[in-house]
Amino acid sequence: MRWKDSPHAALIALLVIHVMAHIDRNMLLGFSPQITRELSIGNAQYGFLAGAVWVLSFGFMAVFLGSLADRFSRTRVIAVGILIWSVCTGASGAAQNFGQMVAARFLVASGEAALVPAAVSLLMELFPPRRAGTAVGVFFMGIPLGIGLAFTLAGTLGASLGWRGTFYALGVIGVVVGLPALLLKDDRARQAESERGAPFGQQLRNVVGLLRGNATVASTIVGFVLVHMAFVGISFAQLWLTRERGLDAATMARQLGALGIVFGIVGSVVGGVLSDRVAKRMPGGHAGFVVLLIAICGPLMVAYRFAHPGTPLFYVGMCAGFFLPLATYGPSLALIQGLTPNAMRSTITGFTMLLINVFAIAIGNLAVGAVSDRMNAVGSGQALTYVLLATDLLAIAGALFYALAARGPRTDGLSAATMAH
């Protein structure tokens, strides 16, 4: 039996691979106190390492590899990506200074850029439109699971293996998974030329044309990028909680891991399943659903920055920060993919990942690190608190663009005007 005849098995396999990718990616965050101390890395350097280094590779490679996935084999692109990021994850454990860690993480990002564009395109092919948000939401459970497990492993295995030994072990596991994945066939070359992606240059022009001609897709992407500013808060969460809230690093690593897993998964499931079920009856469809999510979670995220550690409001706000960005994946990508031609779906996803990594991850992390360093230098004792509050407000501002998208065409075939009547 062909592997495409078992869409649920394919979804589970892609989810497992996505979890592995985010463990490897976010282990740097889980070990941030140990790595920054041992390699003598400052806040600005850490922000560069967690952000700009990633986007210089991941963001741009996501577009290029997405175009390859649209034109050739999506499974082969994914398999090669697994092998590259796994070998370089192991190499991260051998880094002796900031420059070597930058080089290793740059190549980890290059490999991981292969996964999301190809995987989302596969899921849109394997599942019908009425279940697209659910399938995408389940796949993106890999983000909270990966982030949560990264912090959890850092707080547990770190005591026995150390951060270097943990990176080595993850690299070996990835290679063991990546080699069999090379055997899966997805030959796009046999499809008609109109059903395949164009060569890279033309494919980029096609994406630009789509964005110019479809305001709904463009507004959704902008809103999606802004919501990802919440991930900057996650990147600096452990540093903020230990340095400005006086909490224990190992304890917070375990708590962040556990809460990240639980509420990230809840967000992915709620965003995917509920958006599929209620979008047809809700003004604005998938986009309107995201506006509602931001309206609920945004105020809690702001309150979290000023709540006393250990209080219910502190933990509710923390959980809202994990919940919100993950809850937007299912409805956002279902909307974007549903309004994008089949031959461009991997490329438009890669382009979206590029924008997320440029503005939310690279610029966001670098700005938070640099501004907080400057504020600390002039005597501020709450620099990260106020800078991270600004990123929360930017995430909330994403609701404005989703509101614009809600006024446009919908993937369920109903217009906003129809719903209004």
Image (cartoon, helix red, strand yellow):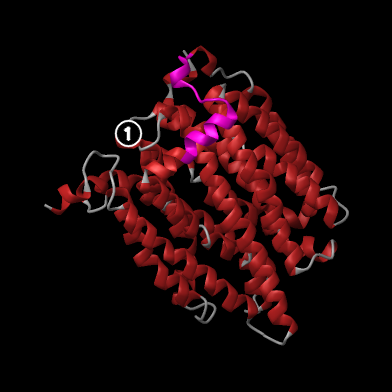
Residue pointed to by mark 1: 129
Q: At x 73% / y 57%, what residue is drawn?
A: 49
Residue 140: percent from left, percent from top:
49, 44
Disc 1 residue type (three-letter)? Pro
User: Image quarter for residue 58?
Assistant: top right
Q: Is residue 221 left or right of residue 114?
A: left
The dominant secondary structure in magenta is helix
User: 315 or 401: nearer the eye?
Assistant: 401
Q: Is residue 346 left or right of residue 163?
A: left
For the residue labelled by badge 1, is the local secondary structure a helix, a strand or a loop? helix
Residue 294 lies, in percent from the top left, at 38, 63
Q: Let me know if residue 338 appears in the view.
A: yes
Q: Looking at the rendering, which quadrant does residue 28 occupy? A: bottom right
The residue positioned farthest toward the left in the image shown: 421
- Magenta span has 196? yes
Segment tinted magenta in the rendering: 191-208
Residue 120 placement (x, y as % from top left): 48, 35
Q: Is residue 120 visible?
A: no
Task: Say whether residue 157 is magenta.
Answer: no
Residue 400 is situated, as x and y percent measured from the top left of the image, at: 37, 62
Q: Looking at the picture, does residue 346 appear above or below residue 167?
A: above
- Residue 265 lies, with reference to residue 393, above or below; the image says above
Number of numbered labels in the structure image: 1
Q: Residue at x 46, y 33 (%)?
A: 345
Q: What's the residue at 26%, 45% (across, down)?
A: 277
Q: Nearer the viewer, residue 203 or 186?
A: 203
